[in-house]
Image (cartoon, rainbow, N blue to C red):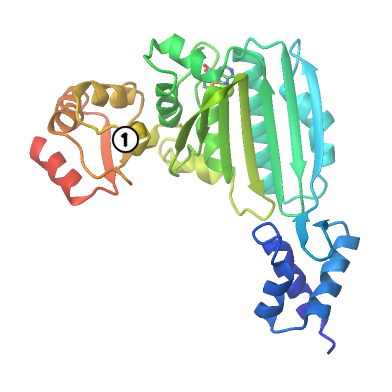
């Protein structure tokens, strides 16, 4: 049977978007999905291999298909670097045709993270990696400096490095208030589809408005590594994300935040004490509105709730606290202390 060009496009699109999820069963799955024969599917798979969009690994009998990845790497000595020049001279020319909204996100994330290396890392070396396939762009910015979580821990006098992650999730944290505003990681983590920071033994995946996961590894990763990944067809627009944390018509400055409270619960810690609450609310007074997203938090203790929703509220009547995704128990506890 001969298919129209449109149907062929559809089949190829399906193959491309499913190849990473099902590298071993791609052929059979495509047969089942379109109710077409194996030789037909193989014909299109082979065309995609010839076009250098996917590649075959494994044997003929047990093929394993993947998207073709092109990797680039640059190494710089961290002296007199300028992030916009690295972007426009080295990275941007290799991106090829790309929707302008995605290009803008990549430029923003790249220049913000490289600027962090230049201004905050105390590193000697900067490594940039870019990995591109038919569907995604991944950027990695790596330095061999002091390490982001340690730096924040030292500046704020925190007990544990992992508490630094909460500060990044709040936003507006900077170790250099004279020259910086603490927005780079906050917004970068919210515009990419995936965002990860690795430093010493700590890895953090998420931030943004999504759940975050923190884990500790045995191996020590000296310095800081940031990974940012976005789909080439992402509809996201940087300006919309900026506007989400401002009032574009009244006050376009960054004055709202949204914090996943679950970030505090790592290692099964229950949220009971006043000191945990104080850690959560520190620097809330830098915002006019603080959203607390209780998604995934089953309950909170009386002292924890009292410190936030009565003591802090009385002290800072100008800061509006907004709660979302509360369970019945959490909502009741908040009502009780108010
Ligand atoms: N590569 C890094 N090495 C060490 N510390 C870092 C690094 N990147 C960021 N930081 C720390 O994280 C803070 C927040 O970064 P960011 O959100 O970009 O805000 P800003 O650059 O405006 O301070 C920085 O002020 C700095 O303390
Ligand atoms: Mg920055």
- Residue occupying the far bottom of the picture: 1
Question: Ligand 1: does it lie within 8 Å of the C-beta at label 1?
Answer: no
- Binning the other alpha carbons within 10 Å of mark 1 as few (below 14), some (14 to 19) or many (20 upward) gives few
Name the one closer to the observer, 233 or 214. 214
Residue 301 against residue 163 in the figure, above or below: below
34 or 187: which is nearer to us?
A: 34
Can I make out residue 252 in this image? no
Query: x and y percent of residue 234 in the render?
Result: 63, 53
User: Which residue does the image show at 56% across and 30% down from the upper left?
Assistant: 197
Residue drawn at 40 percent across, 28 percent down? 166
- Image x and y of residue 125, in percent: 73, 15
User: In the rendered view of the protein, which quadrant contains the N terminus?
Assistant: bottom right
Callout 1: SS: helix
Give the image quadrant in which the ligand numbered 1 is located.
top right
Q: Quadrant of residue 210?
A: top left
Quadrant where the C terminus is found in the figure = top left
Residue 154: horizontal and vertical position, in percent?
45, 9
| Location of mark 1 (residue) | 268
* Residue 337: x %, y % from top left: 10, 35
* Foreground residue among 141 and 247: 141
Q: In this view, does 115 lie above or below 190?
A: above
Left or right: 130 as drawn, with respect to 32: right
Q: Compared to 136, does 217 lie above or below?
A: above
**Of 336 and 204, the residue lying toward us:** 204
Q: Residue at x 82, y 84 (%)?
A: 4
């Amino acid at each position: 049977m001969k298919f129209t060009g449109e149907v062929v496009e559809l089949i190829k699109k399906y193959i491309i978007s499913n190849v990473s999820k099902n590298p071993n069963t791609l052929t059979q799955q495509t047969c089942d999905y379109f109710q077409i024969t194996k030789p037909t599917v193989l014909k299109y798979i082979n065309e995609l291999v010839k076009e250098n969009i996917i590649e075959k690994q494994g044997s003929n009998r047990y093929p394993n298909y993947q998207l073709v990845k092109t990797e680039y790497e640059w190494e710089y000595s961290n002296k007199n670097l300028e992030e916009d020049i690295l972007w426009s001279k080295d990275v941007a020319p290799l991106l090829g045709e790309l929707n302008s909204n995605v290009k803008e996100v990549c430029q923003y994330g790249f220049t913000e993270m490289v600027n962090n290396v230049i201004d905050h890392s105390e590193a000697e070396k900067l490594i940039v990696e870019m990995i591109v396939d038919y569907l995604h762009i991944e950027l990695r910015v790596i330095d061999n400096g002091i390490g982001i979580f340690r730096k924040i821990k030292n500046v704020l006098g925190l007990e544990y490095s992992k508490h630094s992650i909460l500060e990044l999730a709040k936003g507006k944290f900077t170790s250099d208030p004279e020259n910086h505003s603490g927005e780079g990681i906050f917004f970068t983590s919210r515009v990419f589809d995936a965002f990860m920071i690795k430093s010493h033994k700590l890895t953090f995946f998420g931030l943004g408005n999504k759940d975050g996961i923190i884990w500790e590894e045995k191996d020590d990763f000296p310095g800081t590594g940031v990974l940012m990944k976005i789909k080439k067809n992402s509809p996201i627009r940087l300006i919309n994300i900026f506007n989400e944390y401002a009032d574009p018509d009244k006050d376009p400055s960054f004055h709202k935040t949204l914090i996943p409270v679950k970030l505090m619960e790592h290692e099964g810690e229950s949220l009971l004490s006043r000191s945990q609450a104080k850690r959560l609310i520190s620097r809330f007074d830098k915002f006019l509105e603080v959203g607390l997203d209780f998604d995934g938090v089953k309950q909170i203790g009386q002292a924890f709730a009292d410190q936030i929703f009565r003591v802090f509220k009385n002290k800072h009547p100008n800061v509006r606290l907004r709660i979302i995704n509360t369970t019945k128990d959490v909502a009741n506890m908040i009502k009780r202390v108010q």
